[in-house]
Amino acid sequence: MDFLVFNADFPILSLLIFTPLAGVPLLFLLPVNPFAKAWALLVTVINAGLSLYLLRVFDRDSFLFQFAEHHPWIPSLDINYTLGIDGISLLLVLLTTLIMPLCVLCSWRYIQDRVREFMACILVMETAMLGVFMALDFVLFYIMWEAMLIPMFLLIGIWGGPRKIYAAVKFFLYTLTGSVMLPVAFIALYFRQEPHTFFIPALMGQGFPADFQILIFLAFFTAFAVKVPMFPFHTWLPAAHVEAPTAGSVLLASVLLKMGGYGFLRFCLPMTPQAVHLFGPYILALSIIGILYGGLTALSQDDMKKLVAYSSVGHMGFVTLGIFILSVRGLEGALLQMISHGISTGALFLCVGMIYERTHSRELSHALGIMKRMPIFITFLAVFCLSSFAFPGTNGFVGEFLILAGTFAHSRLLLVFAVPGAILAAAYMLRMLQKIMFGGVDNPDVSHLEDLDIRETLTLLPLLVFVFWIGLSPGPVIGIMHASVTHLLEQVQRGMAP
Amino acid sequence: MIGNVNQAMAIAPELILCVGILAVFLTSLGESLFAKARKAALVSAILAMLATAATFTENSTLFFGTYQVNLFSQLFKLMMLFGLSVTLLCGWELKDIRENARSEYLFFLMTCTLGLLVLVSSIELITLVVALELTSFSLYLLVPLRDEKHGLRIQMESAVKYVLFGLMSTGIMLWGMSYLFGITGTTDLPEMVIRLKPLLHNPFAVIGIALSLAGVFFKLAIFPFHFWIPDVYEGSSNETAAIISTFPKVGGMAVLIRFALLILPEEKSLIDLLVILSVCSMFFGNLAALVQTDIKRLLGYSSIAHAGYLMIGIITLGEKGFALSIYYMAGFLVMYLACFLVICKVSRRGENLAIEDFSGLYKSSPLMALTLGTGMFALAGIPPFVGFMSKFLLLTSAWEDGFRAIVIIAALNTAISLYYYLSVVRIAYTGHPREGAPVTLDGGTKILSILLIALVVLLGIVPNSFIDMATLSILGLR
């Protein structure tokens, strides 16, 4: 096991994965709904606390997979229960554990019906999402990757909005159909590699033949492009975002979308570098189209959730742009953009959810001029909007700047198309902010609104802290990922050399 | 015949079941002794299951070398007796069976199972055919025993179809067997394996094996012997459909493996034939299931598709493939039992259920909805359930042996099948509840559904010990 570092005193990763799952039975044993919320909150907070241990012990100078665990699972096929995280996955793990308590908090009042089942879905989601980022064996990865769809389907389908069934089915069919070829690709990789293995790091940088790489890449690409989602595979996203309950939207935006980018970084780049080289230009083109399309569509939305959803399409376009220009700046920017997007778009969905809880409408025109009534809320919203369109000093700026700087070095033509996307982001975000802050000063609909209570403030506050923390001092975050990203890039460049 | 007491112990499960059959027969003579009959049936099924577990490591050949008790046979017997016990509990009230024929229904169900137990142990063609016919004829009789409501005679039509298709495929099978006997001069299967070796590419051997497989294909519902499935499922009562679709298939699977052992790996034409049948079954089953509105028809078509997946393990003709097929079958058994448990319990008077009838099941009975959801997601092959793991391992072994196209086709079929499995879950979880009294569950049903859910998950997460056992059992056959 050359790729693993066993530097934890106790199986911390398993603990993180299975703590939420272990919390599920108790939800049903004690039949009180308020208890269910408190219990789910407790479990997710404990998990978030546990994940801080990772940050303390993590060795920033190593690109190897740390905190490793390795146990035989199906020995006849050499399928193992192998966990481990490097600089790329550590950040996404931390993002997940941070977002989960907020998802519970924001559902406190929103979910009145079947609370226990809702919380059970949330906790199962956490298990599966953490499993995706930590798994180093393909079978384990795929189980977590697909298992996640079931609770998400139920979250949208049961607690969603008016067109929830359509949205849930579309989400499920799209993502699952996209990834049916994933196991076939891995079976092919398994038998190509000697000795046969499903161990993900052992399949990286192996220099497979080019035509083989192309087939594998296409199987990977359909799975991850749907998840990102890249234009033109994005159509499930607005539907799912709009209909999902607030917690579901936050989960989708903050964590689920990151899995596509993570898949590109973890699988496509190191395993099929030649195919990446071949298909790179097309993917860059799709990314640019995604950025512009997402921006333009967001500009014309009146439904706030739809607006934020389409802005996600644009932001994720920046992520794939950063990944496929294949430079240190681009990759680090993309990863940082993934984290920032998780924080600020998650926060924006929380904000829209809070407006919805008060006005029972997501229409921009019904939320005109609520600044007077809700000053605390509007402060939060303004900061998150600024961070969403990459205002300097906020987290969004660092990632987007790095990506654009990388693009500049790669091709100026691309930059010419990418920069308007950044400006579009400012345009649609400011449009929303302007309407909510100043529009219709004497809008009578908003006279009865109350400002945020303590719970809601507590929900948004951690995200606000991270917006400025990452925005003002991105060094530590980049420090975590740097070793892994440089190693990844070396692998890709070695693989691309003829 | 039977040498000593130990050898008699080897067939203890069959003997216990015989006693059970006698008991059920005696109760059927009296009036309204149905409650006693079903208790006798269940007790003997469970005792036989325990006896199978006790004789798990038994290894003996009885009845002049026609009857073999080993790990292979006992593993299949255990699966089938488990299936029998669960289906007995599913149809505990036998709501939709004619009131004066309920004890007889149980009687035929038991003789069917006895036939299956004999079937998986027989290693001689004539014994095998007799056992197969005992099974089939008992099953034929179960179908028309459905209650006639408002002059509804759909069960008669189904029964006639079932009998005609069954007899036809038996005829084809016997025809093939006569060729095999003709060229090898033996009806003893292990001996036949040896004598067929030098007869590679002999057209009679190829045709003989292919035709002999017809009887098995009929049981497993593999294209082109699948036509009876949807109509028979729809026409028979829910309990009967639960029976026909589950453990007789396990028995068919055992015979399929025994016949597959006759095929030499060099016999490309036969293997190609099996590949084509497997692909046709997958596509036909999945595409036809997309447009179904009746839940039993949907499960019927889906079982055709699953029979196609199952064949992927057989075409590799290796121990690993066979063992994984057995694992797939075990998974299929628990998944279908879970689905049919829900169907039997949700159907209040035993009427046929449309998919729409599950609307809002989540509100009226969360446990039933969970069982149905687990079963459907598992059938669709979504992790962490057994449906995923068994399919994944089967595809891995097929890829290893060079069957790449069929792996890709199977993966595509998974995508097709998603839609209809998902639509059942969608209706159960997001639909509005139907009017009428909520589904009431007794304690036994609750325990049973939790047990089935646990099995669907556990078989998927820890498949290792089962696969090792299945591999061992296959190795014992060679």
Image (cartoon, coloured by chain):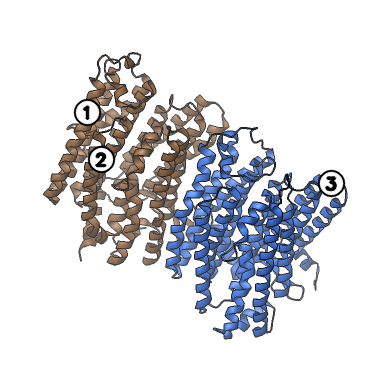
Chain colours: A brown, B blue
**Res. A194 visible in picture:** no
- Judge left or right: residue A481 versus residue B274: left
Label 1, label 3: how many angstroms apart (C-alpha)?
Answer: 79 Å
Report the chain holding disc 3. B
Q: Position of residue A209 (x, y in %)?
A: 29, 67
**Is residue A291 placed above or below A282 in the rendered structure?**
above
A319 and A79: which one is in front?
A319
**Residue sitting at x 21%, y 28%:** A430
Report the chain holding disc 2. A
Q: Which residue is mark 3?
A: B33
Q: Which residue is mark 2?
A: A294
**Residue sitting at x 26%, y 23%:** A436
Q: Which residue is mark 1?
A: A431
B4 and A119: which one is in front?
A119
Label 2, label 3: how many angstroms apart (C-alpha)?
Answer: 72 Å
Q: Position of residue A275 (x, y in %)?
A: 26, 60
Q: Which mark is residue B69?
A: none
Label 1, label 2: how many angstroms apart (C-alpha)?
Answer: 15 Å
**Dot 3: element:** loop
**Residue sitting at x 51%, y 31%:** A116
Q: Amino acid at mark 3?
A: Leu
Closer to the chain start, of discs 1 and 2, is 2
